[in-house]
Image (tube, rainbow, N blue to C red):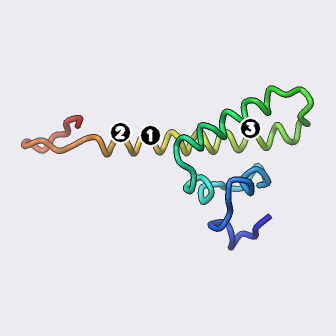
Amino acid sequence: MAGKGDRKDMDREDMEEQNPGEEASAVEQKLSLEEAFGRLDQILAQLGDKEVSLDTSFAAYAEGTRLLKYCNDYLDQVEKDMLVLNKEGGLDEF
């Protein structure tokens, strides 16, 4: 696993190896929204597998919550980008 100074050089596979308490924002920034949703689907399948250990499930859950926050923030930003100022200084949807 990469050291703290190497986080920005991590790829998607490295995200799976992170400790649950570590931030994954540098990795998530490299993901497209579609890739993040795809990874969330993988995590859901993993959490539904009865053969997966409790520790692995906790780590997957933590990664999933980080990904959900990333997706939510991404969509919020898209929504803000879709607003434009009108003549009166108010905001209108684009």
Q: Residues within 10 Å of mark 2 (few under 14, many from 20)?
A: few
Cα separation, mark 3 vs mark 1, equals 21 Å
Task: Give the residue pinned by disc 1.
Answer: 75
Tell me the residue that label 2 is attached to: 79
- Residue 13 sits above or below residue 68 on the image: below
Residue lying at the far bottom in this picture: please name it: 5
Q: Nearer the viewer, residue 68 or 35?
A: 35
Which circle marks residue 61 in the picture? Answer: 3
> What's under tag 3, amino acid-wise?
Tyr
Question: In the picture, which quadrant includes the C terminus?
Answer: top left
Q: Position of residue 68 (x, y in %)?
A: 59, 39
Q: Is residue 61 left or right of residue 86?
A: right
Give the distance between the C-alpha atoms of the residues marked 2 and 3, in whole angstroms. Answer: 27 Å
Secondary structure beneath disc 3? helix
Q: Quadrant of the N terminus?
A: bottom right
Horizontal arrangement in the rendering, residue 39 relative to residue 80 (left or right)? right
Q: Quadrant of residue 35?
A: top right
| Real-space Cα separation, disc 2 to disc 1, in angstroms | 6 Å
Q: Residues within 10 Å of mark 3 (few under 14, many from 20)?
A: some
Are dots 2 and 1 in contact, CB under 8 Å?
Answer: yes
* Residue 9 pos. (x, y %): 65, 67
Task: Kindly identify the residue that appears in the image at 62 percent across and 66 percent down.
Answer: 8
From the top left corner, tell me how far across and down residue 92 is, in percent: 19, 36
Give the residue type that dot 1 points to.
Leu
